[in-house]
Image: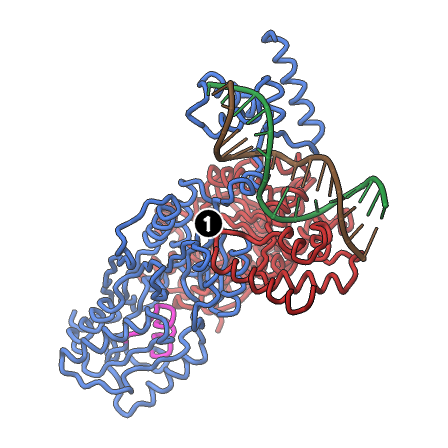
Chain colours: A red, B blue, C brown, D green
Amino acid sequence: MQPITKLVAVQARIMDFISDNKKEITIYDIARELNISPATVSRGLNDHPAVKSNTKKKIVQLAKDLGYQSNTFASNLRKKRTNTIGLILPTINSNFHSSVIAGVEKVANDAGYTLLISQSLEAAGKEAANAKTMFNSRVDGLLVSLAYETNNIEHFQPFINKGIPLIFYDRVFEHKNCTSIVIDNFKAGYEVTQHLISQGAKKLVHITGNLNRNVYADRLKGFKLALMENEIPFSKDNVLAININKEEDLQEAITTILGMPERPDGIFVANDTSAVILIKALKKEKIKVPGDIMVVGFNNDPISKVIEPNLTTVNYPGYEMGEVAARNLINHLNGVMDIISTNTIILRSDLIIRESSLRNL
Amino acid sequence: MQPITKLVAVQARIMDFISDNKKEITIYDIARELNISPATVSRGLNDHPAVKSNTKKKIVQLAKDLGYQSNTFASNLRKKRTNTIGLILPTINSNFHSSVIAGVEKVANDAGYTLLISQSLEAAGKEAANAKTMFNSRVDGLLVSLAYETNNIEHFQPFINKGIPLIFYDRVFEHKNCTSIVIDNFKAGYEVTQHLISQGAKKLVHITGNLNRNVYADRLKGFKLALMENEIPFSKDNVLAININKEEDLQEAITTILGMPERPDGIFVANDTSAVILIKALKKEKIKVPGDIMVVGFNNDPISKVIEPNLTTVNYPGYEMGEVAARNLINHLNGVMDIISTNTIILRSDLIIRESSLRNL
DNA sequence: ATGAAAGCGCTAACAG
DNA sequence: CTGTTAGCGCTTTCAT
């Protein structure tokens, strides 16, 4: 076949493709055109070493000319691998979580994985439904940050049974088969509290969330330790563990605080959005922040720099956490085994001191 | 086969499944067990009308017992449909966009579609890359809100050529084959400006973004019309069209405003985050808001209720927009043709008046 | 270095 | 109402 003929043939096919948008190009089309077998085309396209580099070049070129698109379904069906990883998180709409997503996306894309994202909206039921969808979609691995409400991880059992790697981050669940990626919430909680005390707080209150979630439980432990170390007696009045995502519950907690015979002079709130609501309420009552009450939040959400006074908070490496989680998962999938004991990865966090807790200026 | 035997057989299979986590249950397994053909099993599982309801029940029950999971890839491969819709948006991390996602997710899930989400991060290049991935993943339809930077929609041409429905929302591109879902930005911009004028503003400035994006261009038109109607002369000094997502550019614009010989007394900013930055800067300069300068934003982001004074803004129905977009797309896919002329769908938006623009209290 | 052939699991004519 | 048959597009032995 002379070059000119080939060219014509190619052009004819291109025309076909453009005119008839129904027909997809397959490796058979390429094989026929090149008078080779589909198997070789498949190999060529996948850069298999045992294909003459000349043939390979021709295959790739023609594939490009014809606008060939590999059919993922056929490939997945055959390979029994999807090159997809799932990500289930409480909500997409927060600075922290969207940073995580960006980090995961980056690593996943670079490694040629597709990312399937879904939000549990803090509900255990939706989390379970999402898990099921992910399982049916046969994700190769799953990244999870637990919903606020979740009590057990039965809905993830199918993954564990089937040996699909499951990695928790931030809101984690201890499980021998799963890696956890977290910050040291205990230490962060401790530092926040120490800071408040160093600024002169004598009566402290900690507003926190569901203590089944490690993030809240651990911060509380840090809070307690700091009190203890400073010989400040601890009673259950010091802690308001509420449904921190429900504004009414938070308002109720605030009312409780306002009604306390001896009001606190330092409040550690387990997240920034709640801390902001608290500050607004305090200001409405003409209570000065930090003058009368100092407030510290958690997360370093952008909102913390909008509220006045600017909020002291703990910075949280979302993007990095996403990267680490995805990298870890993909390593697992590629059989790169980390040291067996890598069951928990702890990332750095930092106390960011701003006006809301600065009494000694 | 007696009941008892069947039971044993089932149990044996269940054991198989549990012990050997390698082997997936297929419709063949179910067929064999029930002594019927795989085709019938397939029909039964898909609730095909032509299957005796008794048989159907048995099939479904056994499938459940065996922990059968339909293999999406085989099914997609066969049906040439993925039941997946793609969503490409500028960024996930904003109240508006995450509301949209929630709306889309809801409708998509209810209709049995899987959702593939990816963010362009406002970059044309990433948008194109995402589009390519979506195309290769063979999404049945695509929902898009354009990146800030995007200049043309060549990267979506493959979808159009192939007849894959493409719907734009919010940041749209007029195209005869594509539906657009928007709010009336022109009217909203007009109302904002009228409001400022009604509050006594005489010298107005509009800070906006890339005028290639309909959302900014249309709001500007509304701004202009309101000025004209109130016989306020318009000059190009009244408009600062900058890269509104770049904080340095915004700061520069603010400097420009502060340096104006005659300072404006009303500023309309095209989004809330920028309006907040502006207010912070003004307050730093001891300029009173709204006393000296009134400020209005756009989007009704939660942040608008944190800044002091609370920000007047335009509420934007994100969740609903997501629902409408998804519903429209899915109708298309199901061949439910809307009236041909449904090329643009306009949703309601509302001016929300708060302190930042209230001079006549 | 390449080809032949089988099969991943499912669905859709078609036939009965 | 159910079964037979073929094939979606790709990968992977096993040959050669």
Residue at numbered disc 1: B140
In the foreground, A274 or B141:
B141
For disc 1, the chain is: B
Q: Which residues are magenta?
A: B268-282
Give residue A275's quadrant in the image.
Answer: bottom left
In the foreground, A173 or B1:
B1
For the stretch drawn in magenta, what is the main secondary structure?
helix
Name the amino acid type tagged 1. Asp
Label 1 SS: loop
Q: Position of residue B218 (x, y in %)?
A: 28, 71
Residue under the image location 44 percent in, 18 percent down: B53
Q: Position of residue B188 (x, y in %)?
A: 24, 67
Residue B96 to residue A119: above or below = below
Please check the rendered image and state whether residue B274 is part of the magenta-colored stretch, yes or no. yes
Residue B172 to residue A214: above or below = below
In the foreground, B332 or A186:
B332
Which quadrant would the N terminus of chain A be assigned to in this image? bottom right
Residue B347 to residue A140: above or below = below
Q: Position of residue A100 (x, y in %)?
A: 55, 57
Give residue B356's quadrant in the image.
Answer: bottom left
| Position of residue B98 in the picture relative to residue A320 (left or right) | left
Residue A141 to residue B165: above or below = above
Q: Is residue A261 visible?
A: no
In the foreground, A299 or A132:
A132
Residue under the image location 66 percent in, 51 percent down: A329
